[in-house]
Image (spheres, coloured by chain):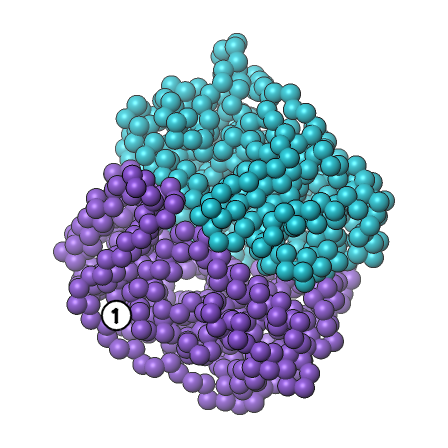
Chain colours: A purple, B cyan
Amino acid sequence: MAISKETVRKMKGYTLHTIKTDKYKTNTLVWKMKAPLEKDTVTLRALLPNVLQSSTKRLNTTAKLRAYLDDLYGAHFYVDTAKKGEYHILTFTIEIANEKFLQDAEPLLQRGVEFLAEVLLNPHADGGQFDSQTVEKEKRVLKQRIQSVYDDKMRYASMRLIEEMCKGEPYALQANGVLDDVDAITPADLYQYYQKAIREDELDLFVTGDVDEDRLAAICECLRFPDREPTRAAARTLQKVSSVKKIKESQDIRQGKLNIGYRTNITFGDSDYFPLQMFNGIFGGFSHSKLFLNVREKESLCYYVASQIESHKGLMMVMSGIESANFDKAVSIIEKQLEAMKNGDFSEQEIGQTKAVIRNQLLESTDTSRGLVEILYHNVIAGTKTGVEDWIREIKAVGKGEIVKVAAKIEPDTIYFLSGMEGK
Amino acid sequence: METQQFSQLGETLYGETLDNGLKVYVLPKRGFNKTFVTFTTKYGSVDNTFVPLGKSDFVRVPDGIAHFLEHKMFEKEDGDVFQQFSRQGASANAFTSFNRTAYLFSSTDQVMKNLETLVDMVQAPYFTAQTVEKEKGIIGQEIMMYNDNPDWRLYYGLIENLYANHPVKIDIAGTVDSIAKITAEQLYECYHTFYHPSNMLLFAVGNVSPDEVLSFMRENQAKKKYEKAPEIKRRFPEEPAQAAEKEQKLHMNVQIPKCLVGVKALHTSQRGAEMQKNELVVNLLLDMLFGRSSDAYNALYNDGLIDTSFSFDYSQEQGFGFAMAGGDTKDPDLLAKRLKEVMIAAKEGKGLAEEALERTKKKKIGGFLRQLNSPEFIANQFTRYAFNDMNLFDVVPALEQIRFSDVLETAEAFFEEERFTVCQVLPK
């Protein structure tokens, strides 16, 4: 087992996480900005990284900025927004070749860090506002991105489930923001919000690759921010489900999309989080799981059926694509599988398989810098210190009794079905 | 065992052709936990007309049969092989493309055991009338899932436009009607024709020892009886040079229109170094014209005609190939017009600069290094390259040799109005 070790160092206003490994041909910088997920800021936050990545004060057009990156052996630079529990996370990633595999020896890692500093600290702005053309362009693209969810019916059904299930909770918001709030944003509003985010967000930089930690920390001196005490999201409240909500909608599509949401009331950092991972694996996470075997293999009702957990909000989602006429049958088979889990109706073999597969999945994800950073970032969100080895040890130690206890906590909350229009 | 060293890349490749013709390659990756293995046959959806092993006449098999066969390889008399893989901590999968079917697993434990499971699974077909029937419902839902996906429909609609006769225009999974006709006998016939070891390649990459893999494979294959197979006879229809249809508009339940412009490839009989060079030149050309540092990309973006979903790509195979560019757009007709104008202008060298070529080559070299972080990329692409007599690890030297004149000549010959087509997805 070769798991790369994380070294953590407090920097000016942020935390530097270094993961030294010589297995990659590139070095990867992952910059994370975290703040509570809120209606008032979600659209500003969704727009901000897209404006920042378009141009800087020096590289003041996208063409110039991208040509500069091409010259750095095609440094791969992209931004992303996501929600983890009730936090809104902005991610800036730069993956850049390690010059030891190249004929010419330009110090690419250093160039990458300097570029990140330029994007974050020297944006294309003047007189307290961002370049207005850039903002208008990115507003248009953001609106199109928000709307495009509607066109991908699997994503759309997942989004609608969350909207219905978490109505009134911040988690019902989309990471891409609110369509109707985009137009009103001015270049000055966004700049003000940018300054606030730079001042108050919790900031983390993860670097994976063949790097020397001291040298890296010296290079990162060009990234300096004010010290801060990051804002925590409101504490989680136990969500009791009184009755299962059923939402049915129909559109002109060929296949019905069935999405069911459950409350697990278990989040990362809780003592039964690893038993929950085991529960999910036996129930629906894999191709040996109960859902796959019963809904797909036994009944041939679908091509895909799976469950997944949201680690920081305490949810589990089941999703499947079925013929609309089979709705009742599919729901009833899924319910039976949950019942079986609650009754402890699963074998030592299912437990063994699930442990082996989860262990494999964890180890495999540490082979990609993205996977490794995602595992480690759980700790930033939950305020924990769980390394990959801890994950593996904890999963191994889970017993059947704990899984049954977890099963007892899981409550169906909302059944969402987007049906086709056949027969209408 | 043959060894090839790529010192600038820090990689060493080990390979051997076994007595039954199976090619086996191993690329150890230091520091990785996982091993990724693909076992691939040079057989995909386009191979629908062929002479079955031991017969003398051509047969035409139902659309979607290669993909159907891929699904059925996982089921055996004593159950589902997915179960065994997960007991052994592996994650297994398979995919069918136009001209390949690949079976694969990745695992961080019991790698040799999983390798045995994979190879034995692929080399022991088991089809019955009942298991074949059962799969029809599952694959039917897979087809429906793709039918609802506008990006998928757009991409395959474009290919359908370009080709008049070649089976690349047929959906890989077939249709609900075409798969209804598939029988166990037909699956066996396809299997015996195309799954002979001499038509296959095994690639292992990751935390794995070349000696161990090769000696296991020698022994495993020596135990199995294979008659020497004659060369497989496939037949493809004549295909004109021009695009079959100028445009296609698909009306779907979407809010944002989508538009792709396609160009039908030249030179689809190329193989080896010649093919590798052509493929790289066209890819460089597209990147120079439409990459995010290009004039065209920025003009289209600034004019509100494209967003970050914009992409472009070129792929070339035996008998077919295509370039495409496009994405989500508020004005699909105008976008199509503008994209075509950029390509036509490039025939005269417009939008192409020597300095941009050097920059784009650097970008491609860096991109290749990034791809070498991925065991999946290495195994899949090495196999694809090998089936076309090319070597994946020649990409950097081949890129370095490309001259500006190559790009200009290719632009001149490639962008021809008669080979253009447009496919759009529009709101209902």
**Residue plotted at (57% across, 44% down):** B424
SS under mark 1: loop
Residue A112 image-quadrant placement: bottom right
Viewer-closest of B387 and B89: B387
Q: Where does label 1 land, which residue?
A: A265
Q: Quadrant of residue A161?
A: bottom left
The answer for which chain carries disc 1 is A
Which residue sits at x=80%, y=52%? B351
Query: Residue A205 in the image: x percent, y percent?
Result: 55, 75
Q: Give, as a three-letter code, the residue at label 1.
A: Asn
| Residue B203 seen in this snapshot | no
Res. B399 in view: yes
**Considering only vertical position in the picture, is A47 above or below A343?**
below
Q: Is residue A266 left or right of residue A357?
A: left
Q: Quadrant of the N terminus of chain B?
A: top right
Q: Residue at x 20, y 71 (%)?
A: A240
10 Å neighbourhood of mark 1: few (<14), some, or many (≥20)?
many
Q: Position of residue B416 (x, y in %)?
A: 75, 36
